[in-house]
Amino acid sequence: MQKRIALALAASVLLAGLGRSSDQEVFSRATRTDGLPNGLKIVTIPVQPSKVVSYYTIVRSGSRNEVESGASDFARFFEHMMFHGTHQIPRADYTAFLTRLGAGTNVIATDDFTAYGIVFTNPDSLADVIKTEADRVINVESTKDSIQAEGLIIQGENSATVSNPDRRLFELLRATAFDKHPYRHAAPGSPADFRGLSRRQADSLLYKKRFYAPDNTILLIAGDINRDELLPLIRTYYGGWEASKFTLQPPAEPFQSRPKRAHIEWPAKTLARLAIAFRGPAYSDKVNDKAALDLLASAAFSSSSPLYHKLVFEERTCLSLGTSFPNTRDPSLFVVNAVLKNDDVAGVEEAILKELERLQHELLSARTLAEIRSNLKYAMADSLSTTGGMAATVAFYLGLTGDPGTINKLFNLYDKVTARDIQDMAKKYFRPENATVVTLKGGKAK
């Protein structure tokens, strides 16, 4: 997804700055945010001389938007249709355009947004890109024929992953942990919903009207650009796009008052798996709950942590151990997951819970905390060191907050989190009644 187009000098300056002071901004590029009357937001990041342009259309639509019963499939459907062309620019013409442009494309699909990216090396083609990408998102199609055809394709994709035990484990984890919030289903949607998709064209058009709309979309253009030349073109091609004026209110998830458990008996031989989840906070660059737990996750379960070393290298109980704690717009799950070399799921669960209990009573050392902060900064600096990588990273955070400044705010928050804060967050979230545990064990070889 991130093409390595070297900007060695900029990267070295950035990394040197990170080494000197915690006050150094992680994201040092100047950005400019503009808007159209219809609600479309435009974020521009000039990078000269690079001869590379990244153009992202960020639609803040994912499984979070699928609030109606039986509608877990529209985010994935429109993600597919964005690559199928429109009545004005059919798929073959769009593919030919990308070929002439020499462009690379990608998509970032999350529970909260879908970002469509084009990276190309001829800034003189920007006017054609704006015209084409405007048509692509404004006129994305949902006809009876396209629903019928694409629904079958997506059903096939889902069927191909049914045999994946990791996916099944996390699907069950989400469905068990959440009762009402649409995070209870993953972004790909439910196979049952896809089978009925062709009967719900009117619903799909309503979804498009609500969410594939200018007041739910952000354009990010980074690279060799001139904002004064770019904005008139955007007004020309996006200015007539009608705003939806729809405000989404996902159902609030009720408080979890008891621990939950679920189990999968896998029909074939496979390694046992364990996922322990706790209801966690949403992404924030203002309050430190999520930031503190990010630091805790790295300290307790990364490949350099004592527990990882014990379970993976010393006892060789686990093939892998890690965490999943995505940045999300609404509260989601802090998950500790393990793949076991044997079937001692109970023993590994006990070891993980003991580690979480320890963190509620012992403070991280200053050295450990400093090393984790440094690693996070260097990883972020690396992702920002090329035009394409920078655009993809900024697009992700824009999808969450709409604010390109959130990256620096987040890392400023990381710098302010103390060991006591981390301990307090461990006590707040790692309560027994807040836990959901899902296990998977495989059958015996025949």
Image (spheres, grey):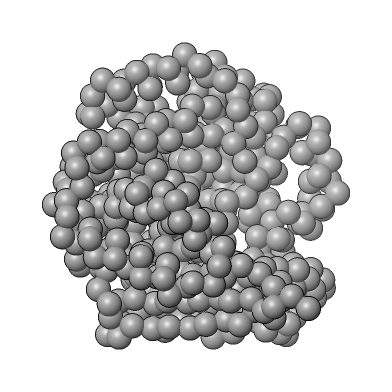
From the viewer's perspective, is 36 left or right of 351?
Answer: right
Where does residue 50 sit, x and y in percent of width and height? 57, 19
Quarter of the C terminus within the rendering: bottom right
Nearer to us in this view, 356 or 282: 356
From the viewer's perspective, is 177 left or right of 127?
Answer: left
Check the image and name the residue furthest to the front. 315
Q: Residue at x 45, y 56 (%)?
A: 315
Quadrant in which residue 343 is drawn: bottom right
Q: Residue at x 77, y 54 (%)?
A: 85
Nearer to us in this view, 107 or 424: 424
Q: Is residue 76 above or below residue 100?
A: below
Query: Can I make out residue 168 in this image?
Result: yes
Where does residue 272 sit, x and y in percent of width and height? 57, 70
Query: Can I make out residue 180 in this image?
Result: no
Nearer to us in this view, 300 or 388: 300
Quarter of the N terminus within the rendering: top right
Where does residue 43 sit, x and y in percent of width and height? 45, 39
Q: Residue at x 62, y 50 (%)?
A: 107
From the viewer's perspective, is 337 left or right of 79?
Answer: left
Where does residue 10 sit, x and y in percent of width and height? 45, 18
Q: Is residue 265 above or below residue 95?
A: below
Quadrant in which residue 359 is drawn: bottom left
Q: How many marks?
A: 0
Q: Is residue 148 above or below residue 324?
A: below
Q: Residue at x 47, y 72 (%)?
A: 345
